[in-house]
C-alpha cells in the first residue's frame, strides 16, 4: 500500500544557520487523500464562519485528548486551554508550548489540531501545550485582534519568566503567521523603546523558539510562484489565500510587518537568540513565501531546523489522526526538534 522510502532521497543539509531536511517521497494513500481533497476542495473551503466576538469558547473533543487532562483559563480576556499529559511533570525545567491553530484567521481549532497538540503534550517530556483561542475574523480582524494578542503575548512571557518556564510559540498556517508576528513585533517595540534585545537581562521576556508549520508569511500574495504552484495544491488556491488575507488585514496594509513577518526585522530574532523552526510542503501555495522567509532567517543568522517535503499538501501533519505515514513522520520530526529547546 505504501511507497517504499529510500533514505537516499532525503537528507539534512546546512543552509547557513538553518538546517534543512528535504524529502521527496509520497505514499499511495497520501496520493489518494490529496485526490479526494482536491475533489471536495470547494466544500472544505466554503461557508462563512459565525462565532462570537472576542476569544471564542472552545469545546475540546474528549476523544482526541484521552491521554491528557485539559483545563481552561483566561489571560487578558483570551481563553487558553492547557493540555497536560498524566506523565510526571518535573518541578523545574518545565517547557510550555503556546499553540495558535490555523483556519484562515477565521475558524476555531479543528479536531486535527487538538490531536496534534495532544501528541505533543504526550511525547514531549515536562511540557504543557496550551491552545490559544485568539480573537479572529470576521468579527475581530487584525486591527482589532493583533493589539489584543500582543497584550496576551507580553503577559504570557512575563508569567513564564517568573515561573522559570521555557516557552515555544507554535502554530500552523494562519496560526503560524501569528506565532511569527507576535514575537517579531514585540522585539521591534523593545528595540524602538531603547531596550537591548541581545541582552536577556535588559530585554523583556521572549520565547526560546518558534515552530511555524506551513506558515503564511507574506499577505500581499504577490509572489509569482504562487500562481505557478496553484495547479499542484489540492487544498488551497491563489484566489482563496488572497481572500483570506484580505479578511484578516481589513484596513491594514498587507505588507505591514505585523501581518507579513517576511517584512519584519528578522535580525532581531538572532540578536535575542530565538530559534525559528518550520515545515513547508511542495504542493502548498504558501510554500514559496515560506521558503523565502526561511532563507531570510539564514541570511540573518537565525538558528533553526526546517523540514521541506515535496509532494505534500498544506499542513499535511494535521492528517495525524488518520494514520498517514507522512503525518506520523512529520510530527515525529517536530517532536525531535522541539525536544532540543
Image (cartoon, rainbow, N blue to C red):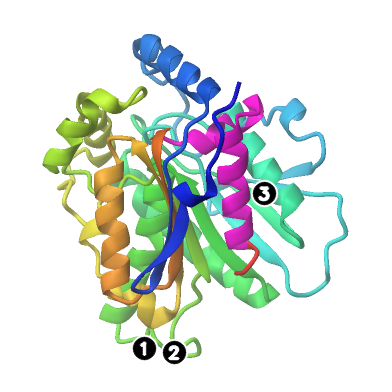
Number of the label disc, if any, that sits on residue 196: 1
Q: Which residue is mark 2?
A: 199
The residue mark sitting in front, 3 or 1, is 3
Q: Looking at the image, can residue 43 be seen?
A: yes
Where does the N terminus fall, quadrant-wise?
top right
Point out the stretch of residues depicted in magenta: 314-338
Residue 267 percent location from the top left of the image: 29, 75
Q: CA distance from mark 3 to mark 1?
A: 33 Å
C-beta proximity under 8 Å, tags 3 and 1? no
How many residues crowd around disc 1 within 10 Å: few (fewer than 14), some, or many (20 or more)? some
The residue at the point 46 percent across, 22 percent down is: 31
Q: Quadrant of residue 103?
A: top left
Q: CA distance from mark 2 to mark 3?
A: 30 Å
How many residues crowd around disc 3 within 10 Å: few (fewer than 14), some, or many (20 or more)? many
Residue 244 percent location from the top left of the image: 28, 31
Per the image, is 196 magenta?
no
Number of the label disc, if any, that sits on residue 251: none
Amino acid at each position: 500500500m505504501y511507497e517504499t522510502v529510500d533514505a537516499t532521497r532525503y537528507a539534512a543539509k546546512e543552509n547557513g544557520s538553518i538546517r534543512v531536511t528535504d524529502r521527496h517521497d509520497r505514499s499511495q494513500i497520501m496520493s489518494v487523500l490529496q485526490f479526494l481533497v482536491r475533489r471536495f476542495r470547494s466544500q472544505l473551503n466554503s461557508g462563512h464562519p459565525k462565532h462570537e466576538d472576542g476569544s471564542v469558547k472552545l469545546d475540546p473533543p474528549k476523544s482526541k485528548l484521552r491521554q491528557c487532562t485539559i483545563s481552561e483559563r483566561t489571560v487578558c480576556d483570551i481563553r487558553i486551554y492547557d493540555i497536560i499529559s498524566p506523565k510526571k511533570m518535573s518541578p523545574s525545567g518545565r517547557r510550555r508550548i503556546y499553540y495558535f491553530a490555523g483556519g484562515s484567521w477565521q475558524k476555531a481549532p479543528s479536531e486535527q489540531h487538538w490531536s496534534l497538540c495532544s501528541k505533543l503534550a504526550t511525547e514531549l517530556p515536562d511540557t504543557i501545550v496550551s491552545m490559544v483561542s485568539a480573537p479572529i475574523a470576521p468579527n475581530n480582524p487584525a486591527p482589532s485582534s493583533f493589539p489584543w494578542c500582543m497584550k496576551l503575548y507580553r503577559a504570557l512571557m512575563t508569567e513564564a519568566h517568573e515561573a522559570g518556564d521555557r516557552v515555544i510559540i507554535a502554530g500552523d498556517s494562519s496560526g503560524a503567521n501569528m506565532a511569527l508576528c507576535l514575537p517579531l513585533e514585540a522585539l521591534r517595540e523593545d528595540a524602538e523603546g531603547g531596550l537591548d534585545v541581545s541582552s536577556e537581562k535588559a530585554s523583556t521576556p521572549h520565547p526560546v523558539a518558534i515552530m511555524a508549520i506551513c506558515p503564511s508569511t507574506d499577505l500581499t500574495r504577490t509572489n509569482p510562484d504562487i500562481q505557478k504552484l496553484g495547479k499542484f495544491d489540492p487544498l488551497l488556491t491563489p484566489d482563496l489565500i488572497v481572500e483570506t488575507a484580505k479578511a484578516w488585514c481589513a484596513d491594514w496594509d498587507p505588507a505591514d510587518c505585523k501581518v507579513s513577518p517576511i517584512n519584519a526585522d528578522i535580525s532581531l530574532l538572532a540578536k535575542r537568540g530565538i530559534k525559528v523552526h518550520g515545515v513547508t510542503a511542495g504542493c502548498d501555495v504558501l510554500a514559496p513565501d515560506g521558503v523565502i522567509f526561511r532563507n531570510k532567517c539564514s541570511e540573518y543568522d537565525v538558528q533553526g531546523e526546517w523540514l521541506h517535503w515535496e509532494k505534500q499538501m498544506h499542513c499535511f501533519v494535521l492528517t495525524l489522526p488518520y494514520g498517514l505515514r507522512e503525518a506520523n513522520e512529520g510530527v515525529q520530526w517536530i517532536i525531535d526538534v522541539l525536544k532540543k529547546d
